[in-house]
Image (cartoon, coloured by chain):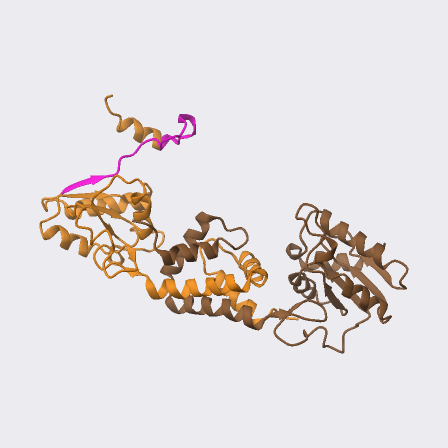
Chain colours: A orange, B brown
Amino acid sequence: MKELPSITKLTNSFSKLPGVGVKSAERMAYAVLNMDPEDVGEFSEALKQAVENIHKCPCCGVYTEDEICEICSDKGRDHSVIAVVSEPKDVLALEKMNSFNGVYHVLGGVISLSKGKSIESLSIDSLVEKVDKGDVKEIILATSATLDGETTAVFIAKLLDGRGVEITRLGYGLPMGASLDYADSLTLAKAFESRKKI
Amino acid sequence: MKELPSITKLTNSFSKLPGVGVKSAERMAYAVLNMDPEDVGEFSEALKQAVENIHKCPCCGVYTEDEICEICSDKGRDHSVIAVVSEPKDVLALEKMNSFNGVYHVLGGVISLSKGKSIESLSIDSLVEKVDKGDVKEIILATSATLDGETTAVFIAKLLDGRGVEITRLGYGLPMGASLDYADSLTLAKAFESRKKI
C-alpha cells in the first residue's frame, strides 16, 4: 500500500513551512484527518483569506488588510521619525512596547552573504527617497543584533550619511530580567560600553 | 497596531496541530505570507481535499480514498491473519517492510488511563466479530511497545482467549518506549519474525 495521494499532497505542503521536516509534516497531515472537519475547513479558508486579503503597505512595507496600513495613515503619529526594521513581524514586536510614536520602514530582509541576500533585494531605494523628500528628522536602525543585522545597519547608515538626517541604532546591553552570569561576553562588553550615569 | 485578523485566524489554525505552540504557529502564519501564492492555494486545497476524499475503510479502519481499502479488497492477501494496530498510520509503517501478507485491523487508539481512553472508544467489538466468524487463524497484536500499547495487547489477548484463534504479539525487536511509526523497517521486520504466542 502506498501513501494516499491526498496525504502526500498535504505532507508536501506542510513540509514547506519553517522548521517542519518530512516526518513532522507527515504527522501533521495525519493529525488533520483526526481534526474536526469544521476546523479543517476554517484552516483551509484561513490560508486562502490570508493570501487574498493581506498585502504589503505600499508606504512602509508592513502587512495590512487596508490600502495603506493603520500606522502610515495615522496622522497622530510622528512621520518624521522612521524605525527601519528587517521583517513585517518586527513591527508587531516594537508596537507591543507601546512607546514609539513614529512610523516604520520594512526592508524585507537583511544583507546576508550566507543566504545570498544582496542590497538590491531590499527596499532601500524607497527609504532614501523618503529621506531626500526632506521631512524626515531621524532614522532609527532597528535591525537585529546579529552579524547580518549589523552589516545592514552600517550599510544604511553610510548610505544616508550627509543627507541631513539623524541616524541612530538601537541600544545594546543586557536584556531586562537577565542575570549577569547567563549573558554572553559580547553582550556584556556591549553593556559596559553603553553604560550610563545614574 | 493589533495583529491582522487574517493572521490571527491562521495562527489559531496552525496551533491546533501536534507539537505546534503559539509562537511556532505565528511563525508559520507569517511564513505563509512569504510563500508563493500558488503554493498556498495548493495547501488550502490539499486540506479541503484530504477531508473530502479520505475516510476510514469500513472493513479495517485504515484511511482510504476508495470505498474499501486496497488491502482489504486484495484477494491475494491472507485474510486469515490480522495485524491489530493502534492508528491508521501504523499500517503504512508495517507495509513498508514488504513482508507481511495478511490484513489489518485498526483500533483507533490504545487503552490509556492517563488520556482517559477506555475500551469502549476502540473498535474491539468488530475485531471480536471477525474472529467469531471463524475464518481467522492468527491475530498479531502489533500495538506500540509502550505501557498503553502493552495494556491494550494484553487486554485483547485475554478477550480473544478460547475463541479458537492463535494470538501473537510483535517480538521484542522493538526498542521499549518507542512509537511504532518511528521504527525503521528492519527493526519492524525483526519484530514480526520473532513474534510469540501470548
Residue B187 appears left or right of B7: right
Residue A158 appears left or right of B14: left
Residue B92 appears left or right of B139: left
Q: The N terminus of chain A is located in which quarter? A: bottom right
Q: Is residue B22 magenta?
A: no
Residue at the image point whose x is 78% and y is 56% from the top = B170
In which quadrant of the rendered view does residue B119 lie?
bottom right
Q: Is residue A177 magenta?
A: yes
What span is colored magenta in the figure? Answer: A166-186
Residue at the image point whose x is 81% and y is 67% from the top = B129
User: x%, y% of residue A195?
Assistant: 26, 26
Residue B177 appears left or right of B136: left
Q: Does residue B197 appear in this view?
A: no
Identify which residue, A106 or B186, lies in the foreground: A106
Q: The C terminus of chain A is located in which quarter? A: top left
In which quadrant of the rendered view does residue B133 lie?
bottom right
Residue A42, compared with residue B151, is above or below; it is below
Q: Does residue B4 appear in this view?
A: yes
Question: As drawn, which residue projects farthest toward the top?
Answer: A198
Question: As drawn, which residue projects farthest toward the bottom?
Answer: B75
Residue A80, compared with residue A32, is above or below; it is above
